[in-house]
Amino acid sequence: QVPLVESGGGLVQAGGSLRLSCAASGRSFSTVTMGWFRQAQGKEREFVATITGSGANTYYADSVKGRFTISRDNAKNTVYLQMNSLKPEDTAVYYCAAAGSSGSTYYTHRSNYEYWGRGTQITVSS
C-alpha cells in the first residue's frame, strides 16, 4: 500500500496562494507517478496535474496551467502542488493520487491511479 495524506488546504482570497503537500509511505516512491485531482461540489473529480517518478516530466490541466506547479521531493516521499493566482472556480476538494503503473510516464485519467488520499478542502473567496 501507499497511504497518502494531504495537507495544506484552507480558505484563501482570490489572487492568493496555497501549497498542498502529500506525504506517501512505502518504498520505491521515486518510481511512482503522482497526480493531483480535484472535485467541486456537484461535479465529477477532474485531473489537475501529474508528475513522473523522477520529477522530470509534468503535465497540467488547461484550467491551471501557468498558475499551479507540481513538484516532488523523493527523499521526503512527498509531492507538492503550489497554487498561485487562485480563483473562486478553484474551490474544491483536492486529492493526491499514486499511479499503479510505470512511473516513467504521466497519466491524466483517474483510472490510472490506484491509491488516493482522503482529500483536503480548498476554498477561494471572491
Image (cartoon, rainbow, N blue to C red):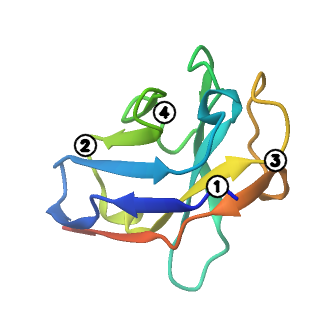
Q: What separation in Å lies between label 3 and label 2 (alpha carbons)?
A: 32 Å
Q: At x 26% / y 40%, what residue is drawn?
A: 84
Q: Amino acid at mark 1?
A: Val
User: Of discs 3 and 2, which sits in the foreground?
Assistant: 3
Q: Is residue 84 left or right of residue 69?
A: left
Rendered view: 44 above or below 29: below
Q: Earlier in the sequence, mark 2 or mark 4?
A: 4
Q: Quadrant of residue 90?
A: bottom left
Residue found at x 81% / y 47%: 100
| Quadrant in which the N terminus is drawn | bottom right
Label 2, label 1: how far apart the Cα atoms are: 31 Å
> Which callout, 4 or 1, points at the residue further toward the start of the chain?
1
Which residue does the numbered mark 4 point to in the structure image? 65
Instruction: Bin the neighbour count of mark 3 within 10 Å (Cα to Cα): few under 14, some 14-19, many 20 and up.
Output: some
Residue pointed to by mark 3: 100
In the image, residue 104 above or below residue 116: above
Mark 2 or mark 1: whose residue is earlier in sequence: 1
